[in-house]
Amino acid sequence: MKREFEMNIVGELNYFLGLQVKQRKDRIFISQEKYAKNLVKRFGLDSRKHTSTPMSSSAKRSIDAAGVDIDPTLYRSMIGSFLYLTISRPEIAFSVRVCVRFQAAPKESHLTVVKRIIPYINGTSDYGIWYSKDSNECLARYLDAD
């Protein structure tokens, strides 16, 4: 980064634009654990039981014309928070993209799908991505950053 940007070296990079960075000799781990925990608290779903997947296979993935309208502000806020989290959490990207499609006129059924993503994030807040310095390999959803 020093070659591309003007910067002062004040030590090892640990936190940058909401990303937590753990550097090792041969790899770098990037996560958003702090952001994920704050997101769960922000939407008040930290007491819900953790889920093993971000989206149920029976989730409503279509327009729900007969459904009950909800406040789109809350829905869009949740989706925006998830989109930022996909930087280090590619495994939630599909679920988030499915939910993005209904931002214009979200229904109660769509909000239920979005609210399922939060307990998954709560149970997997320490997930992130390992980048190897020697190759193009990376591991998603790696648990142990140490």
Image (tube, rainbow, N blue to C red):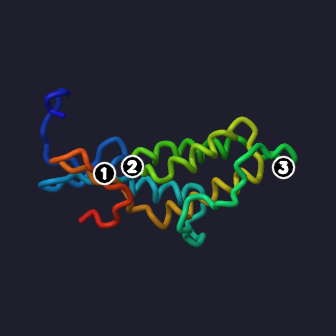
Residue 16 is situated, as x and y percent measured from the top left of the image, at 30, 43
Q: Residues within 10 Å of mark 1 (few under 14, many from 20)?
A: many
**Label 2 sits on what residue type?**
Ser
Q: Position of residue 18 (x, y in %)?
A: 37, 46
Q: Residue at x 15, y 32 (%)?
A: 2
Label 1 and label 3: CA atoms lie apart by: 39 Å
Q: Residue at x 31, y 51 (%)?
A: 30
Sequence-first disc among 2 and 1: 1
Looking at marks 1 and 3 on the same chain, the residue that comes earlier in the sequence is marked by: 1
Residues at discs 2 and 1 in contact (Cβ within 8 Å): yes
Q: Is residue 143 above or below residue 106?
A: below
Residue of label 3: 68
- Residue at 59% x, 47% y: name it: 78
Mark 1 lies on a secondary structure that is: strand
Instruction: Find out whether the residues at labels 2 and 3 contact each other: C-beta distance under 8 Å.
Output: no
Q: Which amino acid does the dot numbered 3 rest on?
A: Val
At label 2, counting other C-alpha atoms closer than 10 Å, the crowd grade (few under 14, some 14-19, many 20 or more) is many
- Tag 1: residue type? Ile
Residue 88 is tagged as 2
- The Cα–Cα distance between marks 2 and 3, rounded to whole angstroms, is 33 Å
Q: Which residue lies under the disc numbered 1? A: 30
Figure quadrant of residue 33: bottom left
Name the residue rendered at 63%, 61% in the picture.
Answer: 56
Question: Mark 2 and mark 1: span between their CA atoms?
Answer: 6 Å
The quadrant of the image that shows the C terminus is: bottom left
